[in-house]
Image (spheres, rainbow, N blue to C red):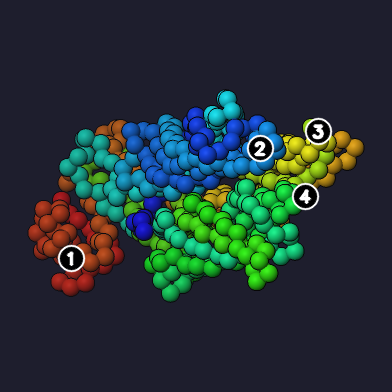
Amino acid sequence: MEHYQTPTLWRRADNCPILHPEAAKDCILPDSYPDIHRILHTTATACPGRTLLNGGKLQTEGVLHTAVLYADEEGAFYTVRFSIPYTGQMPCAAEEAEAVVVADTVADSITARAQNPRKLAIRGRLTVTPYLFYRCAEEPILSPELAEAVPEKKLQTVTCCQLRQWSEEGIEASEDLTLGQEPPISEIVWSDLALEVTSCEAGAGEIRFGGSGLLHLFYLTPAGKVQYANIAFPIRSSVQGEVADDALCRVRLLPEQVSVLPVEDASGEARGVELDFTYSIWAVAAEKSTCTRPVDCYCVDVPTEIRTETVLLFAGMKEAAAEYSRTVEGEAGGLQSILHTDARITVDSKEQSEGSTVLHCTAKLTVIGADSEGRPISVQLTDNFPLSIEGGEPCFCRLGGGAAPVAVIEEGSLKVRYAGTLSCMVAETGTATFVGSIRPASGELPSAADSITLCYPAPGETLWDIAKRYRIPQSAILSVNDLCEGALPAVLLIPH
């Protein structure tokens, strides 16, 4: 398992662009598959690799796992799967020194077009939302004229957020599932697995999470009829991680290799399935932390100008959620009966306002059924809608669809109703002002004999350390400050 841990104080970059890498591949059908007559549905799952800042550019890579449902000339259903690598990059002006990138990746859209009966052109678009953190400078920048000067610091305690990220691939799992009241299975022609985490908590050195899996199936009954079914099952597992018990956590599960086989019951009918799959875990945890930073600096021999820098701190996180319920209407396109309805919802962009954020979402709906002659057909609809989140800037979003969308045909018109919940971590960002640079001030320079330095000893610093730094005897410091050897006060006067 890969484990990334940020140091105590990191600053969040506010100019980190969203990436939209493209995945493209021309795929040939295996010899055992019949020719393509009509493409019905295409799904994709993004398995991200690395996202990093390199050479002034954000770079990302990964694999898009696709599944294409199609019909042959006789109306039979078939599924073919391909894995397509993707890469993408965008210019990014943020500093690169010791940058840590936490990226949230989803498959935005996927299309498959038959170039000929044996060849598919598959094109995918992903949305990679990076959150870039980098270390605040330990010391202010001095102008060349003051290169030999040693600035003194007064320390300020600030609250920030410590982030940790984990990833693990190739986890094996299996489930024995039953159809319930659906007709028995003769042959499985298409399957798709969705995994959703709905609860997550930290404690005792691990992140525990729970949720549900939903297996979608198209299969043939013993009578030769195409049937759709979905089977839900619970998920409970954990990820090892040294995080505080009150840390806020988010886990995403990405299914990879999926195998579904019919299982017969005591009567000899296949009324269940054996589900074997592998999946990846992506987890991120945020916990409160405190640290100290210099806020005031003083130069010794010349009057100076101190330039401050206000930074955006990732100060804290909390959970937020918003529900949505939509009905979309469009042309039925010859659809007479409905087998299955699917919805893919993504967040395209966001607008910040004081105390809230408006997310602009897109829903892409697919309805699979048959025309008046019983031939398989699919219809696609698109819906755009805003969603408001209160309390800060959303990050690490999760759009849950809940139950499958419901579609009906009324007088040649197709109506699809879908609903769900967007849940996310909301960042409570704060600001802190630090000294960024020091340079000589304009005007007359006083005599060095008239100057004095204010020194704020750091925790654990001794009189010997301070005397060595300023290259003066310890006795001179003791005399000016009227001290005896021992504990140091909060502020010392350093003579010249």
According to the picture, the residue beneath numbered tag 2 turns out to be 71
Quarter of the N terminus within the rendering:
bottom left
Mark found first going from the N terminus, 3 or 1: 3
Q: Residues within 10 Å of mark 1 (few under 14, many from 20)?
A: few
Assess whether mark 4 and mark 3 are in contact (beta carbons under 8 angstroms).
no
| Label 2 element class | strand
Between marks 3 and 2, how big is the CA–CA gap? 16 Å
Between marks 1 and 2, how big is the CA–CA gap? 80 Å
**Which residue lies at the image location 60% right of the left edge and 63% below the top edge?**
263
Mark 2 residue type: Ala
According to the picture, the residue beneath numbered tag 3 turns out to be 334
From the viewer's perspective, is the residue at label 3 or at label 2 nearer?
Answer: 2
**Which residue lies at the image location 73% right of the left edge and 60% below the top edge?**
182
Q: Residue 358 location in percent, x, y? A: 65, 44
According to the picture, the residue beneath numbered tag 1 turns out to be 462
According to the picture, the residue beneath numbered tag 4 turns out to be 406
Between marks 4 and 2, how big is the CA–CA gap? 23 Å
Q: Residue 309 location in percent, x, y? A: 40, 43
Mark 4 residue type: Val
User: Residue 65, can we see it?
Assistant: yes
